[in-house]
Amino acid sequence: MGFALVVAVVVLGFSMAFALGVGSVPVPVTDVLAVVARRFHFGDLGVSVADDQIVWQMRMPRVLGAAAVGAALAVCGAVLQSLTRNDLADPYLLGISGGASVGAVTVIVLGVPVLGLLGTSAIAVAAFAGALASLGLVLGLAAGRSGSLSPGRTVLAGVAIGQVCAAYTSFLVIVTGDRDAARRVLEWTLGSVAGLRWGTSVPLAALAVVATVCVIGISRQLDAFAFGETSARSLGIEVTRLRWTLLVGTALVTAVLVSFVGVIGFVGLVVPHMVRLLTGPGHVFLLPMSALVGGILLVWSDTLARSLIDGREIPLGVITGVVGAPFFAFLLRRHTGGAE
Amino acid sequence: MRIDAHGLAWAAGGRTIIEDVDLVCEPGTVTGLLGPNGSGKTTLLHVLAGLRRPSAGRARIGGDDLHRMRGRRRALRLSLVEQDASTRLDLTVRQVVELGRVPHRGRWQTEYDDPVVEQSMRLADVETLADRHWSTLSGGERQRTHLARAIAQEPAVLLLDEPTNHLDLGHQIDFLARVRGLGLTTVAALHDLELAAAFCDHLVVLDRGRVAASGPVGEVLTDDLVADVWGVDANVVPHPVRRRPHLCWNDTLDREVRA
């Protein structure tokens, strides 16, 4: 298992190096490595200024951001699936995507400034605020007066709030938006890491690392949910407290991701399942492995998104679906022979 | 460890499920919890496991209040084998048994080849199944795996909720004999009066949430009790070989009246 983790780290590193070379100006992998080596002060192997600009200033933030977002989404999905014992749980479970869309679409369609900001920053702030608002509503609706978050009720509350948000955004786009606004809303809804710069992708990478390390620390508690809530409690897990902490924690991480890169589906839902098929359900491996595979998947998806059609970006959500689904189908087929 | 409970009650949505339950289990004894469907056996067991806070009364384990302990400390003293607990995860038997070590391990501690896990699997006779996957196990194998997990918790008290459900006769006898052999303070909710008479030291009979009778097996299990609590006409006679009480039932009482 440790070996698998090492392999995944190497594959992620190689994927990133490869992705840094791909674009309108191709850069050979050796030159990419030379640029990275110089920037990390491992020695100067003769790097041209143009290569340095392209690889380090233009592509690196985007590739690093893609890896971070993929990792964080996959880890959040894995945690939520175990916590709710629901195979369909994903990071947007608590109405995060709906609420964020309300904020983002309002800014995109109406063009209103937020906190004096315009454009992408305004969209990010509005999306984050919308995500927090809907999270509050979902938690309030799910917990009620009892204060305990039953997984079933929480999922239903998320669906209900999500529907309300979808109704609002559709109404706004259809009634007041023009055709261009509709296109931009659709693009935002399908996600993109094109807007990431150093200033945003480093915090995102830090967030992904911190989130992954934190949840690895509670992996044993998550293991204890295998036979349900009663069993977890009889093993000494403080279920209510753990559930609140993790639901709110993953929701906040997801809210940050959504506000920077929009809604990227599939990764958080399917990567944990892929990894479970590969490494089994133990969380000590499932969580770091999900992070690495999520990162790898998103780095490749983004590389395809920006290179498949010359001069045009394909939305990330489209690619993750097209790349991920066949691989997942292959794994599922391979494993249906064994269990159940 | 001794369990003693006084005046336990638990209510849900204004409906009282158990009321005024007194119970004492001496260290190392096996107590059978009997009663018809819906009499409150599982509820009482969950209260004793610390999973439900009683609305009245209190329960102690080794002298400490069960419901004021932190979950982890409680899990180090008692373990529960639930009724029909299953999982869709593709866990192996060893991984399930390792769950019993959860309360023993620190957050960043990973331990491989834990001797307690191996020994627990031996005691529950699942060591040959160690690498089998949960979905491939039979009912009896699953139940023994749960027992191994409970043993791996190294508890002083073992709580079992209808552990012989879905097991054939041979596996029922084997399972309860195995539990007795552990020498732990045990409370088991059981449906089968015959098995209860054979393997328990004490019986507590619940009827509509209240204790209808409690005491040593021979004193509790009588013709009258079976008629009162289960509505069954029966004769309790000494078992021809084992000399323990043996139940010969004739018919349910209301059917007899109708006939």
Image (cartoon, grey):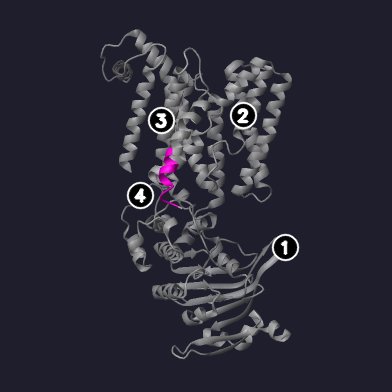
Question: Which of the chains bears the disc numbered 2?
Answer: A
Quadrant in the picture for residue B153: bottom left
Instruction: Name the mark nearer the viewer: 2 or 1.
Output: 2
A136 or A193: nearer the eye?
Answer: A193
4 or 2: mark nearer the eye: 2
Horizontal relation, residue A28 to residue A231: left or right: left
Q: Position of residue B237 (x, y in %)?
A: 53, 91
Q: Which residues are magenta?
A: A330-339
As helix, strand or loop, the secondary structure at mark 3 comes to helix
Q: Can you say whether A263 is above or below A196 in the image?
A: below
The disc label shown at residue A100, or none: 2
Residue A157 as seen in the image, left or right of residue A315? right
Work out how far the residue at label 3 is from the one at label 2, CA to CA, in angstroms.
Answer: 25 Å
The answer as to whether the residues below labels 4 and 2 share one chain is no
Q: Amino acid at mark 3?
A: Ile
**Which residue corresponds to mark 3?**
A296
Q: Is residue A124 visible?
A: no
Query: How many residues crowd mark 2 within 10 Å: few (<14), some (14–19), many (20+)?
Result: many
Residue at image position (55%, 35%) is A252
Label 2 SS:
helix
Q: Where, by quadrant of the figure, is residue A334 drawn?
A: top left
Residue occupied by mark 4: B110
Kindly indicate the quadrant of the structure image that contains residue A122. top right
Q: Are marks 1 and 3 in contact (CB under 8 Å)?
A: no
